[in-house]
Amino acid sequence: TIPEMEFPFYDAAQGVIALEYGHANQAIEALGRSVERLRRINSPIAESAVDCYHGYLALAHAKAGDFDEARRHYKLAEKRLRCQKIQDIRERCEAALGRYAE
């Protein structure tokens, strides 16, 4: 079985895999669960992961056609993505959102 502390990361991995295979709704569900679980953990590492997962949630919502929700998640992730120089996710978000990134 998976230890309780590892569930959020397992969910996130499932979400990212679903996103990469084009299953936006599955990605949204898994990444959303991950973010909920990580928010219960009061640590800087959890906060950093949540911000990163908001980037993936932005991509998943954009793929699903919900650009308002995608933009909301991107705005939550953007500062951390820029500070930590996580360019891949940031560039993919900006490409997926296009004019909606503003």
Image (tube, helix red, strand yellow):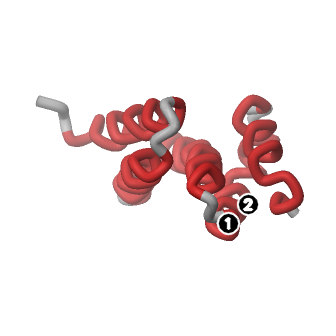
**Nearer the observer, 43 or 92:** 92
Left or right: residue 14 compared with residue 64: left
Left or right: 19 as drawn, with respect to 9: right
Number of numbered discs visible in the structure rendering? 2
Q: The disc labelled 1 sits on which kind of residue?
A: Arg
The residue drawn where x is 44% and y is 52% is: 25
Q: Is residue 56 left or right of residue 8?
A: right
How far across and how far down the image is residue 72, in percent?
A: 67, 66
Q: Secondary structure at mark 1?
A: helix
Task: Indicate the position of residue 4 as horizontal and vertical percent values.
Answer: 21, 41
When asked about the image quadrant of residue 76, the answer is bottom right
* Discs 2, 1 touching: Cβ within 8 Å: yes
Counting from the top left corner in percent of width and height, residue 82 is at 81, 41
Residue lying at the far left in this picture: please name it.
Answer: 1
The residue that label 2 is drawn on is 75
The numbered dot on residue 32 is none
Res. 42 in view: no
Q: Which residue is mark 1?
A: 72
